[in-house]
Image (spheres, helix red, strand yellow):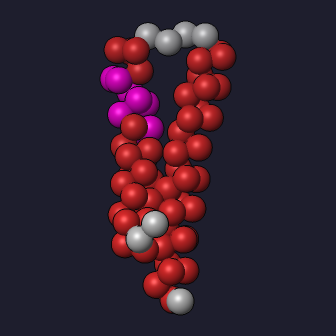
Amino acid sequence: MNKWAELLLGLILVIGAIIIAWYSADWWGSFWNFRSAAWVFLKGGIFWFIAMLGILFILLGISDLKG
């Protein structure tokens, strides 16, 4: 993958994960109306997967810039 595309995709994923976590904290959580512990666990897992994938793409893009 292109180094700039990796950086851009990584930034989009990390910023998107932060925005989703921020919106789901207050008023967005009442819209979804998810009450089960399993769903909360799944949402947390999806958040961390997207965030770590974004960080991975950022690190890959930075390492491509060096090389």
Magenta-colored segment: predominant secondary structure: helix
- Percent across and percent down for residue 4 are 37, 72
- Percent across and percent down for residue 40 are 59, 22
> Residue at the spot x=35%, y=14% of the render?
31
Say whether residue 60 is visible: yes
- Residue lying at the far front in this picture: please name it: 1
> Residue at the spot x=44%, y=44% of the render?
17
Dividing the picture into quarters, in which one does residue 24 lie?
top left
In this rendering, is residue 15 above or below 43?
below
In this rendering, is residue 66 above or below 44?
below
Say whether residue 7 is visible: no
- Percent across and percent down for residue 7 are 41, 68
- In the picture, measured across the screen, residue 16 lies left or right of residue 58, that is left
**Front in this rendered view, residue 29 or 38:** 38
**Front in this rendered view, residue 1 or 47:** 1
- In the picture, measured across the screen, residue 26 lies left or right of residue 41, that is left
- Residue range corresponding to the magenta coloring: 21-28
Whether 27 is among the magenta residues is yes
